[in-house]
Amino acid sequence: MIKLMGAALCFLASFFIGISAGKSERERTAQCEAFLELFEYVRNQVGFFLAPTKRIYQSFENETLAQTGFLAALVSHEKDEVYFDAWQAALEQCRDRLKLSRSQMEIVKAFGACIGKSNEQLQLKNFDYYIAAMKDETAKQKTEMQKNIKLYRTIGFTVGAAIAILVI
């Protein structure tokens, strides 16, 4: 009886580890989508309203980016005398909570680096480039997420079953 309970416990633990590994993939995908939404919002603020850099982020809301602390860190710089590299500082503040891959992070950094650093037309061209790049990364991430979640579940199930068999 104790062997069966131990085997069941090992199986369930292994299976849930596989499921939790998939959660990280979902978070990365959600963060890609959130940054893409922010990119498009910034582009519209600059393109349609000519919003000053310090005021662009005030009314943007996104639960995913709020949970990472990125939006709060970004807005916290609005009262600074010299508003320089606020985007980079915000990324550094919440780096440990961002699940982005290296290439995704590079796109986010590069997008922030071009905000307020040139005339409107050049900024809009840069924004369009980085929006397209993030759309590609998000599409790749969605495909990879679906594949990896299935893989993690299968591995968790298989390892759990193997351990349960060995215990019995």
Image (cartoon, rainbow, N blue to C red):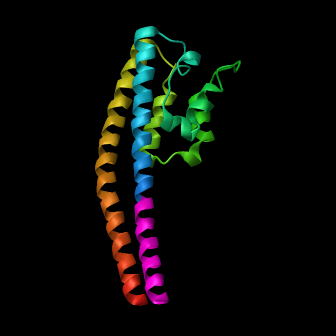
Q: Please report the bounds of the magenta region as a residue range.
A: 1-21
In magenta segment, residue 106: no
Q: Quadrant of the C terminus?
A: bottom left
Tell me which residue sits at (34%, 52%) in the image: 145
- Residue appearing at x 39%, y 76% in the figure: 160
Locate residue 78 relative to residue 142 in the image: left or right.
Answer: right
Q: Nearer the viewer, residue 102 or 146?
A: 146
- Where residue 94 appears, as percent x and y from the top left, is 59, 42
For the residue pair 93 and 67, the one nearer the viewer reads as 67
Left or right of residue 137: residue 53: right
Residue at screen point 59% across, 37% down: 69
Q: Camera-side residue: 73 or 86?
A: 73
The secondary structure making up most of the magenta span is helix
Residue that sits furthest to the top in the current view: 49
The image quadrant that residue 167 belongs to is bottom left
Say left or right for 111 vs 68: left
Residue at image coords 71%, 18%: 81
Against 83, is 67 above or below?
A: below
Q: Position of residue 14 (x, y in %)?
A: 43, 72
